[in-house]
């Protein structure tokens, strides 16, 4: 399986976009991911669209099903910002 690049997540919308990209790369539908994790397809859609906040537990369960994990790194300073 190809390794997908890491992306910084600083908002619900970014978290949803990362989840969607990883799901699509693995050719798994929202329904299939929901069945794998016990999460409603509509909830996965809302997460991917950044319109709902879920517990960290739910997000970690979704990532695990996609073969991914959450990690924390130091934030890289934006160029031009002190």
Image (cartoon, grey):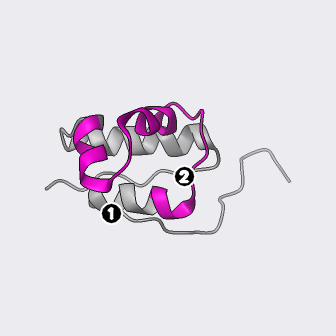
Q: Is residue 4 left or right of residue 80?
A: left
Q: Secondary structure at mark 1?
A: helix
Q: Residue 67: x percent and y percent?
A: 27, 61
Say few, some or many: other residues with alpha carbon within 10 Å of mark 1 (under 14 / 14 to 19 / 20 or more). Answer: few
Disc 1 target residue = 64
Between 59 and 25, the one lying in front of the other is 59
Most common secondary structure along the magenta stretch: helix
Residue that appears at 57% across and 58% down: 55
Q: Secondary structure at mark 2?
A: loop
Across and down, in percent, residue 54 comes to 57, 50
Q: Quick check: is 2 in the magenta stretch? A: no
User: Relative to residue 58, is residue 76 drawn left or right?
Assistant: right
Residue 80 versus residue 51 in the image, above or below: below
Q: Which residue in the rendered view is the most extreme toward the right?
A: 82
Residue stretch in magenta: 31-59
Q: Residue at x 38, y 48 (%)?
A: 39
For the point 26% across and 36% down, which residue is it? 31
Question: Alpha carbon of mark 1 to alpha carbon of mark 2: how far?
Answer: 18 Å
Reading the image, the residue beneath label 2 is 8
Q: Considering only vertical position in the picture, is 16 above or below 8?
A: above
- Assess whether mark 2 and mark 1 are in contact (beta carbons under 8 angstroms): no
Q: Quadrant of the C terminus?
A: bottom right
């Amino acid at each position: 399986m190809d390794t997908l690049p890491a992306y910084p997540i600083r908002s619900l919308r970014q978290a949803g976009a990362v989840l969607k990209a990883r799901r699509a790369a693995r050719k798994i539908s929202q329904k299939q991911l929901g069945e794998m994790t016990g999460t409603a397809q509509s909830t996965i859609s809302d997460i991917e669209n950044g319109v709902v906040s879920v517990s960290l537990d739910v997000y970690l369960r979704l990532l695990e099903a996609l073969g991914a994990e959450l990690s924390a790194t130091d934030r890289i300073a934006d160029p031009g910002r002190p």
